[in-house]
Image (spheres, grey):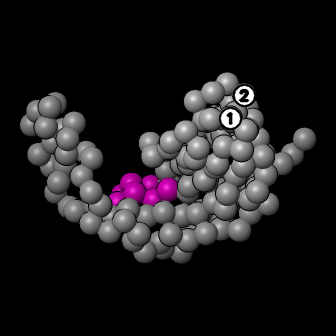
């Protein structure tokens, strides 16, 4: 994990309005959220594992599943998950088995992030700042 300092760190937004701004530029709410915190994820690449720019957020007024929830953004970070080669090779054999194989644990949850992805992550953070902080 590599944190990327940003001007969005600590800023508050209505969650619904935030989603409306981030979805069109490629962000989705990650699967590991609860009623108080979550992440917006931007999938950078999946060629050598999975590389994401992740933007954490915490509910400060309401819960994430409630209308009108306000969230505070945290510091964006790059995350790289490295998966074992060949695990999904047999996932095509049946729809049922594929639904389980795709959720295998990463071999390395905090794998090395190359300079290429670091540079791309910094560019994505600049784009986030432009989208979220401009009037």
Q: Is residue 13 visible?
A: yes
**Magenta span contains residue 49:** yes
Mark 2–mark 1 distance (CA, rounded to whole Å):
7 Å
Residue 64 falls left or right of residue 89? right
Question: Which x, y percent locates residue 70?
Answer: 73, 38
Would you say the residues marked 2 and 1 are in contact, meaning their CB atoms lie under 8 Å apart? yes
Checking the image for residue 52, the label placed there is: none
Which of the two labelled residues, at mark 2 and mark 1, occupies the earlier sequence position? Answer: 1
Under circle 1, the secondary element is loop
Magenta range: 45-52
| Quarter of the image where the C terminus is located | top right
Q: Residues within 10 Å of mark 1 (few under 14, many from 20)?
A: some
The outermost residue toward the right is: 135
Looking at the image, residue 70 lies above or below residue 40: above
Q: Which residue is rendered at x = 62% and y = 35% of the image?
A: 63
Q: Which residue is rendered at x = 83% and y = 48% of the image?
A: 133
Nearer to the camera, 9 or 36? 36
Looking at the image, residue 95 lies above or below residue 120: above
Q: Which residue is rendered at x = 60% and y = 35% of the image?
A: 64
Q: Which residue is rendered at x = 11% and y = 33% of the image?
A: 94
Residue 91 falls left or right of residue 125? left
Q: Is residue 120 visible?
A: no
**Magenta span contains residue 113:** no
| Quarter occupied by residue 126 | bottom right
The outermost residue toward the top is: 67
Q: Look at mark 1 in the image and give the residue it sits on.
A: 62
Nearer to the camera, 16 or 95? 16
Q: Nearer the viewer, mark 2 or mark 1?
A: 1
Under circle 2, the secondary element is loop
Question: Which x, y percent locates residue 1?
Answer: 50, 69
Q: Look at mark 2 in the image and give the residue it sits on.
A: 68
Question: Which x, y percent locates residue 7?
Answer: 79, 60
């Amino acid at each position: 994990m590599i944190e990327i300092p940003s001007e969005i760190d600590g800023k508050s937004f209505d969650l619904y309005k935030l989603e409306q701004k981030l979805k069109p530029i490629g962000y989705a709410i990650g699967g590991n959220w609860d009623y108080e915190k979550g992440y917006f994820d931007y999938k950078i690449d999946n060629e050598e594992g999975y590389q994401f720019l992740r933007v954490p957020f915490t509910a400060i007024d309401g819960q994430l599943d409630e209308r009108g929830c306000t969230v505070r953004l945290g510091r964006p970070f790059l995350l790289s998950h490295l998966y074992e080669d060949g695990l999904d090779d047999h996932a095509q054999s049946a729809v049922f088995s594929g639904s389980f194989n795709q959720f295998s644990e990463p071999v390395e949850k905090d794998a090395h992030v190359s300079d290429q992805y670091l540079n791309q992550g910094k560019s994505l953070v600049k784009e986030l700042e432009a989208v979220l902080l401009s009037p």
